[in-house]
Amino acid sequence: MSDIIKSVDRALDILLYISHIGRPVGASHLSRVMGMHKSTVFRTLITLENKQFLVQDQNTGKYSLGVSVFSMSRKIKLYDIFGPYIKALGRSFKETINVSVLEEPYDGIYRSTIVAKEENNDHALSVNPEIGSSMNCYCSGVGKCLLAFSKNMMPELFNNYNYEKHTDNTIVTSEDLVSELDRIRKRGYALDNEEQELGLTCVAVPIFDSDGWAMAAISFSGPTARICKQDINVLVENLKQVSTEISKTL
């Protein structure tokens, strides 16, 4: 297209690539994989860094997404996208519904962040994190779901967790986490089986992008006694149906 500004197009390609690959990258790597002259890549990186869209690690010289990307992303009203779907689920099942995404592991730790939620006031939870709250993935249903189905996972980062044993059911080693992720991929959903707190259970399924990778995860959360009274397969199938509908709109 003749109206495209090449310098802006290059800058956006770099931002999208760094976001997609999920780890810091250097100018030489970007020059090679994107087919650009290193001097062009370097000038683009400096420009993006100046506006805080990128930040450079002074020790490694590599670049990661910066605070401007984070600030802009927080202004996106994701509830407008997910709201109608999770409201309908809430009316049907009277449980708390969360939609979460995977954070970039800037400090070497995978965490999930809640971007939309629906809750039933009659069934309020004792542990009920708000939109924007983040948590370690190893002990949450949505977190494990995102680790199991997201692209470009780096299992070596699982060793960076300080595996806190919240309950007897909490995963406490990276080996156990890898095994659990294999089971999740085979059955198509994840559980938080009282792994964060006794009496609280979560069922989560991925929301896939057009390439078949998880861009988010959607879950039911509720007291174990209530969740277990229901057929887990029914909960999963309803979550998957909504997940498919959301995927078609994005």
Image (cartoon, rainbow, N blue to C red):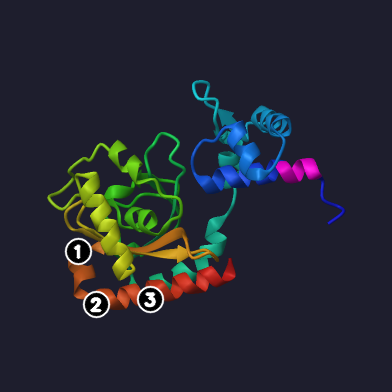
Q: Is residue 45 left or right of residue 136?
A: right
- Cβ atoms under marks 2 and 1 closer than 8 Å: no
Q: Which residue is mark 3?
A: 238
Q: Earlier in the sequence, mark 3 or mark 1?
A: 1
Measuring from the top left, give residue 106's x and y in whole percent. Answer: 45, 36
Q: Nearer the viewer, mark 2 or mark 1?
A: 2
Q: Residue 119: in sight, yes or no? A: no
Quadrant position of residue 55: top right
In terms of secondary structure, where does tag 1 sit? Answer: helix
Q: The residue under label 2 is which amino acid type? A: Asp
Quadrant position of residue 52: top right
In terms of secondary structure, where does tag 3 sit? Answer: helix
Q: Residues within 10 Å of mark 2 (few under 14, many from 20)?
A: few
Q: Residue at x 59, y 46 (%)?
A: 17
Q: Label 2 vs label 1: CA separation? A: 12 Å
Q: Label 3 vs label 1: CA separation? A: 18 Å
Measuring from the top left, give residue 179's x and y in whole percent. Answer: 24, 56
Q: Earlier in the sequence, mark 2 or mark 1?
A: 1
Q: Which residue is mark 2?
A: 231
Quadrant location, the C terminus: bottom right
Q: Which residue is nearer to you in this view: 103 or 135?
A: 103
Q: Nearer the viewer, mark 3 or mark 1?
A: 3
Query: Range of the magenta residues?
Result: 6-10
